[in-house]
Amino acid sequence: MNTNCLLKDEYLNETDGLIYCSNCHTPKQILIELDNNLQIRNIRCKCRLKAYENEQSEQLQRKQMMKIKFLRANCLQDNTLYDYSFANDTGINPQMHYAHDYVDNWDKMKTSSLGLLLWGDVGTGKSFFAGCIANALIDKGIPAMMTNFSRILNTISIMNPTDRNKFIDSLNNYPLLILDDLGIERSSEFALEQVFHVIDSRYRSKLPLIVTTNLTLNEMKNTSNIAKHRIYDRVLERCVPIKINGINLREENAKNNIKTVKNIFSSYTA
C-alpha cells in the first residue's frame, strides 16, 4: 500500500498490513473472507466508534427533549403548569409523597385503570400536586393531559354534536387525563351532560383519571342531584380519594407579597 494515501491520524501496521488509528492504535480495517478470497473492509477504530456512539446518544437525547417539549406544549394548556414540578416542591404539602408513588408505580396504575381524587379546601395545593404528576410523566415521554372542565365546556359549546363527540373521544388518546376543579363548572343541564360524557368516556375506556375538587367526599357521595350523582359515582369508583390538608398556599403567597412590598415601599399600609 502507498503510505502517501494515509491520513494524518493513520499508520500502516507492518504486522498485518492494515491501517490503524494513530490515536487509539486500533485497526481501521479488517480482513474478511468472501468467496474464498480475503478482502479488506473499513471499520471504525475505538475512538471513532466512541465518537459515533456519543453522537448517536446526543441525537437521541435531542429527539427525546424535542418530544418532551412537544408533549408539554400539547398536554399542559396553561403555561403556569410548567412550574408545577417535584423540583419546585417546597415540602409544605404533607401528601406529596403520594404523587411520587403514583409516578413511580405508573405502569401498575395504568394497568389497573386507577386514578386519584384530590379533594380539600381552596388553595391547599391540589393543582400543584396533580401538575407534578403530569410533568413527571411527560418527562418520561408519557402524554399526560391536564385541563379543566371550564376550558372543555368553552371548547365544546361552539361545536356541533359530531365534532363534540370526536373532541371528547380525543381525550382518550392520552394515557393519563387530569381534570382540575370539578364542581366549579356551570350546573346547567348541558354542562352537566357534557361533564358526564367526558367522565363516562374515560370510564368506559378504562383509562386512568385524576380529578381535583373543592367538594368534600360527603358532598360527592350524598348529592341529591341525579346528574351530579352519575358523575361522582364514576369518579369515586375509579379514583382513590386523597385529602389534601396543606395550608392555604394562596394566603401564604399573599402574605409574602405584602412583606415584599413593605420592604420596597417604606410607607406601605394595607
Image (cartoon, rainbow, N blue to C red):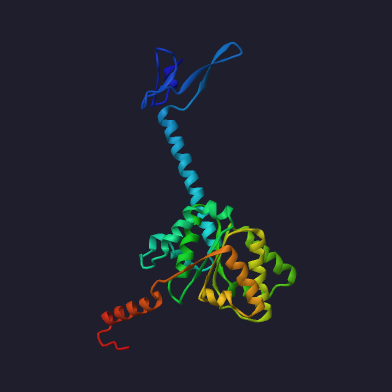
Give left or right: position of 45 versus 154: left
Report the residue that reaches farthest toward the top: 36
Residue 52 in the image: state x and y as whole percent.
46, 35
- Is residue 191 placed above or below 51 in the rendered structure? below
Residue shown at the point (61%, 58%) measured from the top left: 207
Give left or right: position of 184 versus 161: left
Taking depth in this image into account, of 106 and 88 the one nearest to the observer is 106
Residue 129: which quarter of the image?
A: bottom left
- Is residue 185 placed above or below 18 in the rendered structure? below
- Is residue 15 placed above or below 71 in the rendered structure? above
Residue 234 in the image: state x and y as whole percent.
62, 67
Residue 235: which quarter of the image?
A: bottom right
Report the residue that reaches farthest toward the left: 266
Give left or right: position of 4 versus 208: left
Taking depth in this image into account, of 208 and 155 the one nearest to the observer is 208
Taking depth in this image into account, of 94 and 37 the one nearest to the observer is 94
Residue 251 in the image: state x and y as whole percent.
38, 79
Residue 46 in the image: state x and y as whole percent.
41, 28
- Is residue 46 placed above or below 153 in the rendered structure? above
Taking depth in this image into account, of 9 and 86 the one nearest to the observer is 86
Q: In the picture, which quadrant includes the C terminus?
A: bottom left
Residue shown at the point (43%, 31%) measured from the top left: 48
Residue 199: which quarter of the image?
A: bottom right
Q: Tell how many labels.
A: 0
